[in-house]
Each structure stands twice: as structure tokens, then as C-alpha cells.
Image (spheres, helix red, strand yellow):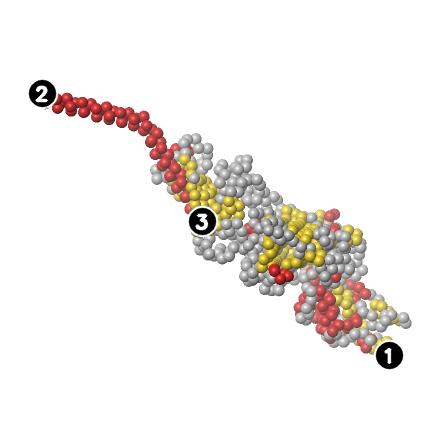
């Protein structure tokens, strides 16, 4: 009996265990597919994350090779058994093998997919349009932090109203890479990189910011930076200077010297209005008279005034790093191009000074030069009826054996300051005349330095005529006797000489009542700034002079108001005018996508309308020398007014920036200045400290001034990355 009882217990136990096993097996059969799917999904998520990380690694390798890379090689870049990558106008799509041997995909985009003329300066991709909103932004060589937008517009585009959840800092890159893996990726092949995925997939997005370490202090963003004094002269008490920012940064003006906004009597000016809510002024001795203006200093909401430290850096843009026209591309001959009122354009292979010296000689006054000039018609169109040049592409001013300048002027020039303006006679003119008056022998040094022929002047007297002569190399005048005395005994050089607007006028009167027979024939154009330098004569320098060209026996009605130069490149492209030396333009300058770059100075008379760089270049004007312009308009003889000026982009000079949009001689006709972007008067080679060459002044005279900082133009103000630079991760997220 006991044996049978034990066998029964074993049987019951076996039955119970069998039921339990069956129950577990049933549960596995019921729950197993979900668990297996979950496990597979985890595997696909891992593959997707690894694909995204592979895309980030690819991008970092490209950036180390070229810090300006933005997925814009526009070709297949990698063809390996386990990796295949193609770039298409800023969009990058790659395939990478998973551990299981199938393809996973990564995608990243710098392209806004907003058309050919958008702020990304990229044409839309040809075939690799990306349908996710996560943008990558390359900010490695920019001088400021940059917003990172979401592509939340139609067709996954970036629009002006797109969200910008964060910024990527200076010297950094933001990479947003989407990885995709799973059965749906089975349709992927190197010849079919980004088709619709029909099956199940897992997606992971890696967003990371990498920065170049140890790049030194960050440049404080500012609408203007001047290596010396920043001066604004307003027409009257109703004018104002307004400073604002088109970004989240503080509206700011920085000056290594004093900063003043005034109006009224130049000998006793009154403070003018300075408006910049929540703004900042940085200048020398800010608390002890360095800043002169009426401004709101309330807290919060007012203007903060503080010292600008000499060591604080400015944006540095060397001539070698400026976007220029390619010397191997379209070009035109350096020299002086002259409009005549009949609509003809004439070319002279001469610098501006040499041209003036040549054409104002009576024997040359009708010389036509080369007409029509040899211009590249595919780049520059000439409209004789409007006295207009249209520039449609970048063009290089090709130096000749005689000069490397580019000058476009009216036949008789154009006044840069109206009659009665103190600057109608430039500071150097006054300085040279004063120097000669105190040292008469200096006149003969000037004559010997500037003249190539003997000189002869005729004067009418009450009883006849007399002559005054000067021979090359002579240190005295000779001439007809008057009442038994040599003419030179009653006529000193200080009485004889006038120096005005680039002209040496030997039209003084030797004896009261004597008048010159031919005053125009007694005017000798000379380069006054060069002369002042040659003879160590200190002068005003840099301020606009008259700009007229007094050609004997020539009448011509053209002025700056009649001439026009328009930059009109195709949308999204550049038209850069580059000269290795001075650029002088007498015309209204306008257009979108234009840039003027000069290895000397830029001098413009008649600047009006609107002249805008685009974001691809950013530079509106760049000059190794000064940038000087006057918007004086002369719509009819003796009638003067000033035009408004609107500039967009970076305006950069290693010298002074001088703008004349008003004059005390025209109290009722001043213009306004509107600058959007950034104005830098560095005052020296950007490899050194600002203001070291004694330059760096900003001097603006206008009814009102508006200065708006806009970082979208600052791509040209690049940080020069060291060779072999490293990229350190600042942030990394995966979702």
C-alpha cells in the first residue's frame, strides 16, 4: 500500500508540473511576438543612433579639412563597401552598414530649402531634399554667435518666422544628424539614397555643438567700432543718432577715442540726441567727458556708458582675407573713365591725379582718350542715355604699366562740398598756402617738384601788359619791369599763390590794379596730400575737397546727379569690384549683392539710393585707405542739396570713415544716413591694435543717423583658425 501511495504522489506532482509548463508555454506563445518585436526595435534604435553618430563623425572630418564646409561639395564623396556619402547643396545623405549587414541611413542639412536667394546662400538641393526640421549651422569662422533655426516652414523650409530655440556660440558648429534603421531601410542602395521608406524603421536624432578651444577673447558685438574718435554732427536739435540691434545682442557703439553727437556752432556745439534703448556706449574716458550727447541713462531701459579698454579686440579683417574679384576672371583696365555730356565714355590710362594734370593743360583739353573704352560687355553694360554702368558679375581692375586705380568721373568732375562750406577748400590746401606764406622759398620747391615745363603768366596793366616768368629749376621769378622796378620786388610768393581744391593758382596780382589775362591758364593741378607729405606739411587731410576739374575752354553740364553705377548680379550671387589701389566714383551707387574692395582709398561723390551687400560676402565696402563719401547733388547750376544714403553690409576701413550728407552752407538741405550691418574704422593693419596708425576716425555729418547692428553680414569677419585645430564637444543629446 505504501508503494502505491508514493507512486500516486509522483503522478500528481508530474501532472501539476506539466500543467505549469503548459501554462508558461502558452504565455510565451501569447506574449512572445511583442517581446521579440521590442527587442528588435531596441536593436534598430541602436543602429539608428550609430548611423547618426557616423554622420556626425563624417561632418567633423570634413570640418577639420575645411572649416567653412557646409555639405556643399555637390558630389559623391565616399564610396566604400560599408559607407557611401553624397553632398547636395548643403544636404548630406549617407549609408552605413549595420552589424547585421544591412544599410542604415544618416541625414544632415545646412540648406534652408527656401529657394536660391535665401539667407543660407545655397541653391535648393537638386535631388536630396530632407524632410526633417533639425538644422546644422557652421559658425566656426564667424565673429559672433548665431541662431539655430528649426525648418518649420512649408516643405521643411526655414522662413523668417521660423523658431530659433537656441544659438550656437562663436567658433562653433552645431550638427543635427538624423539616423534611420530597420526593415524599411531595405530599399536603400547607393543609387537610391533617400527614397520613401515603406516598412518599419527607427529614427534617432543626434544634436551636438563642438567648439574650437583657446581662441582668445570673444569680440563684443557692436554696430560700430572705431580706432579713434567717433563724431556725429547733426543739422539741428531735431536730429538724432539711433543705435539698435537686429539680433538678441545689446545695441552697442565702441570707440577707442571719444564719442560725440552734437549740433550747432562747431566752435561751441550743443549735445545732440542719442537714442538706444537698453543700449551701451563704450569709449575712452567715458565718465570724464569722453561721451557727449543727450541720452536716457535710466535703469532699466536706458543707455549704459562705460570705458572701452585699449586691449579689447575689434573684428579683424585683413586685406588678404577679403572676398575679392578673381584676377583670372572678368577684368577691365585700370585708369580713369570719363563721361561726357553727349553720352560718350572715354578711357585714359592714368591715375586720377595724372589725368587731372594732363587734361587741364590747354594743349590737352579736348583729348578724347580711348572711346569707347575696352569694357568686358558680358559683365559691364553701358547705357549712354543715362550715363550709367551696370555691373552684373565680379570684375577685377587690372593694373596697367601706368596705374592700378579705378576712377569713374564726370568730365568736369563734381563738387564734394557746396560753396561756403569750410571743406570746399581742403585742410591740406590751407596748410600748404599757410606754409608758403610763412616760407616763400617753399613755393619754388613746390614748383620744381610738380612742374615739367617753364611757366609764363601775362598781366594787364592800365598802360599795357607785363609778364611773369618762371624757369625749371629756378628759385625766383623773373619778369617785365614796372616803373623801373622788377616785378618780383613788389610781388612775393605769399601774395601770389592760392591753393584750392587740388589747384595751384598763381593768379595773384603783382601791383594793385593789375589783373591776369588768362586766370584758368595759370592753374596747375597738383596732388595736395602727396605734396603735403613730401614737404612735411601738416594738413587737415581726409576731408572731402571740391572735386571739380577745371578744363580750360570746355563746357559740360554733367554732375554726380547725372551718373549712375548699379550692381545687379543674378539673385543669390555676388558682384565684387576689386582694385589694388584707389577707387573714385562720381555717381549714384545702388544695387543688391554688390561689394567694392580697394587696396587704397574709396572716394564716392553722389552716393545715394541704396547699396547692399548680400550675406554670402557680407562686405559692402572695404578699403585699406580711407572711405570718404559725399551725397552732394547739384540738380541745376548753383542749386545744391544732399541725398539720403542707405548701406547694408560690413563697411570696413583701415583708415578713416568720413560721410558728408550735410553742410552748414546748406542749412535746409541735409540728408540722412542709414547703416545696417557693421561699421569698422580699424585705424591700422588688423594684425595690430586698433588706431595705431593715427587713423580709425568715424566722422559723419547728417540730419539723422541710424545704425543697426546685423550679424547676418558678419561671415566675412572670420576668426582665423590655427592649423590642426581641435573641436571640443560643448553639448550632446540624442532623441
Q: Nearer the viewer, mark 3 or mark 1?
A: 3
Q: Which residue is mark 1?
A: 484
Q: Quadrant of residue 287?
A: bottom right
Q: Which mark is residue 1?
A: 2
Q: Is residue 599 above or below residue 204?
A: below
Lower position in the chain sequence, tag 2 or tag 3: 2
Q: Is residue 483 left or right of residue 8?
A: right
Q: Secondary structure at mark 2?
A: loop
Q: Is residue 233 left or right of residue 725?
A: right
Lower position in the chain sequence, tag 2 or tag 1: 2
Q: Which residue is mark 3?
A: 730
Q: Secondary structure at mark 1?
A: loop
Of the pair 98 and 539, the residue shown nearer to us: 539
Alpha carbons under labels 2 and 1: distance apart:
175 Å
- Measured from the top left, where is residue 613 in percent x and y? 61, 49
Residue at 62%, 52% (x, y): give it.
Answer: 298
Alpha carbons under labels 2 and 3: distance apart:
82 Å
Residue 167 in view in this figure: yes
Image marks 2 and 3: residues in contact by CB distance under 8 Å: no
| Residue at the outermost bottom position | 484
Q: Is residue 538 left or right of residue 147?
A: right
Q: Secondary structure at mark 3?
A: strand
Neighbour class for label 1 at 10 Å: few (<14), some, many (≥20)? Answer: few
Of the pair 550 and 396, the residue shown nearer to us: 550
Neighbour class for label 3 at 10 Å: few (<14), some, many (≥20)? Answer: some
Alpha carbons under labels 3 and 1: distance apart:
93 Å
Quarter of the image where the N terminus is located: top left
Lower position in the chain sequence, tag 3 or tag 1: 1
Of the pair 731 and 633, the residue shown nearer to us: 731
Amino acid at each position: 500500500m505504501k508503494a502505491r501511495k508514493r507512486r500516486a504522489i509522483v503522478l500528481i506532482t508530474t501532472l501539476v508540473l506539466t500543467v505549469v509548463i503548459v501554462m508558461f508555454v502558452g504565455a510565451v506563445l501569447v506574449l512572445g511576438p511583442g517581446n521579440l518585436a521590442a527587442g528588435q526595435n531596441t536593436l534598430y534604435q541602436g543602429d539608428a543612433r550609430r548611423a547618426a553618430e557616423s554622420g556626425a563623425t563624417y561632418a567633423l572630418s570634413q570640418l577639420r579639412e575645411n572649416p567653412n564646409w557646409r555639405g556643399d561639395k555637390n558630389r559623391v564623396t565616399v564610396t566604400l563597401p560599408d559607407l557611401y556619402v553624397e553632398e547636395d547643396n548643403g544636404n548630406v545623405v549617407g549609408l552605413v552598414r549595420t552589424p547585421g549587414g544591412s544599410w542604415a541611413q544618416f541625414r544632415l542639412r545646412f540648406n534652408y530649402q527656401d529657394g536660391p536667394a535665401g539667407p543660407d546662400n545655397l541653391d535648393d538641393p537638386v535631388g536630396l531634399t530632407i524632410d526633417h526640421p533639425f538644422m546644422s549651422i557652421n559658425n566656426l569662422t564667424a565673429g559672433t554667435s548665431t541662431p539655430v533655426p528649426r525648418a518649420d516652414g512649408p516643405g521643411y523650409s526655414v522662413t523668417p518666422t521660423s523658431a530659433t530655440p537656441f544659438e550656437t556660440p562663436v567658433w562653433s558648429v552645431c550638427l543635427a544628424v538624423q539616423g534611420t534603421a530597420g526593415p524599411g531601410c531595405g530599399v536603400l542602395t547607393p543609387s537610391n539614397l533617400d527614397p520613401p521608406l515603406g516598412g518599419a524603421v527607427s529614427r534617432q536624432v543626434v544634436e551636438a555643438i563642438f567648439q574650437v578651444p583657446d581662441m582668445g577673447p570673444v569680440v563684443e558685438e557692436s554696430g560700430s567700432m572705431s580706432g579713434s574718435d567717433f563724431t556725429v554732427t547733426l543739422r539741428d536739435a531735431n536730429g538724432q543718432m539711433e543705435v539698435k540691434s537686429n539680433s538678441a545682442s545689446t545695441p552697442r557703439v565702441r570707440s577707442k577715442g571719444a564719442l560725440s553727437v552734437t549740433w550747432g556752432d562747431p566752435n561751441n556745439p550743443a549735445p545732440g540726441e542719442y537714442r538706444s534703448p537698453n543700449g551701451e556706449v563704450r569709449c575712452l574716458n567715458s565718465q570724464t567727458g569722453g561721451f557727449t550727447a543727450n541720452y536716457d541713462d535710466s535703469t532699466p531701459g536706458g543707455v549704459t556708458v562705460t570705458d572701452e579698454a585699449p586691449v579689447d579686440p575689434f573684428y579683424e579683417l585683413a586685406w588678404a582675407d577679403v572676398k575679392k574679384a578673381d584676377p583670372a576672371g572678368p577684368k577691365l583696365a585700370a585708369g580713369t573713365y570719363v563721361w561726357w555730356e553727349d553720352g560718350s565714355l572715354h578711357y585714359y590710362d592714368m591715375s586720377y591725379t595724372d589725368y587731372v594734370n594732363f587734361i587741364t593743360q590747354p594743349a590737352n583739353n579736348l583729348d578724347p582718350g580711348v572711346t569707347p573704352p575696352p569694357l568686358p560687355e558680358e559683365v559691364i553694360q553701358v547705357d549712354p542715355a543715362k550715363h550709367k554702368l551696370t555691373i552684373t558679375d565680379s570684375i577685377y581692375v587690372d593694373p596697367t604699366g601706368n596705374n592700378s586705380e579705378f576712377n569713374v568721373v564726370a568730365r568736369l568732375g563734381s563738387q564734394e562740398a557746396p560753396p561756403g562750406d569750410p571743406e570746399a577748400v581742403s585742410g591740406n590746401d590751407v596748410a600748404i598756402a599757410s606754409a608758403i606764406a610763412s616760407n616763400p622759398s617753399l613755393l619754388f620747391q613746390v614748383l620744381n617738384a610738380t612742374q615739367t615745363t617753364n611757366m609764363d603768366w601775362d598781366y594787364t596793366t592800365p598802360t599795357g601788359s607785363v609778364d611773369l616768368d618762371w624757369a625749371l629749376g629756378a628759385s625766383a621769378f623773373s619778369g617785365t619791369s614796372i616803373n623801373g622796378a622788377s616785378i618780383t620786388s613788389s610781388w612775393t610768393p605769399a601774395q601770389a599763390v592760392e591753393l584750392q581744391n587740388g589747384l595751384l593758382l598763381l593768379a595773384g596780382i603783382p601791383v594793385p590794379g593789375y589783373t591776369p589775362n588768362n586766370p584758368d591758364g595759370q592753374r596747375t593741378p597738383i596732388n595736395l596730400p602727396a605734396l603735403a607729405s613730401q614737404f612735411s606739411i601738416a594738413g587737415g587731410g581726409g576731408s572731402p575737397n571740391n572735386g571739380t576739374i577745371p578744363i580750360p575752354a570746355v563746357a559740360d553740364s554733367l554732375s554726380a546727379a547725372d551718373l549712375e553705377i548699379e550692381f545687379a548680379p543674378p539673385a543669390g550671387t555676388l558682384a565684387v569690384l576689386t582694385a589694388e589701389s584707389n577707387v573714385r566714383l562720381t555717381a549714384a551707387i545702388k544695387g543688391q549683392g554688390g561689394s567694392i574692395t580697394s587696396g587704397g582709398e574709396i572716394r564716392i561723390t553722389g552716393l545715394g539710393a541704396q547699396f547692399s551687400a548680400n550675406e554670402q560676402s557680407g562686405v559692402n565696402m572695404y578699403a585699406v585707405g580711407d572711405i570718404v563719401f559725399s551725397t552732394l547733388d547739384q540738380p541745376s547750376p548753383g542749386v545744391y542739396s544732399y541725398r539720403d544714403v542707405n548701406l547694408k553690409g560690413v563697411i570696413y576701413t583701415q583708415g578713416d570713415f568720413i560721410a558728408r550728407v550735410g553742410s552748414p552752407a546748406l542749412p535746409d538741405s541735409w540728408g540722412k544716413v542709414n547703416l545696417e550691418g557693421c561699421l569698422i574704422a580699424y585705424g591700422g593693419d588688423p594684425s595690430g591694435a586698433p588706431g595705431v596708425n593715427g587713423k580709425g576716425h568715424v566722422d559723419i555729418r547728417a540730419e539723422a543717423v541710424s545704425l543697426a547692428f546685423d550679424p547676418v553680414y558678419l561671415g566675412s569677419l572670420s576668426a582665423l583658425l590655427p592649423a590642426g585645430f581641435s573641436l571640443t564637444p560643448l553639448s550632446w543629446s540624442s532623441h
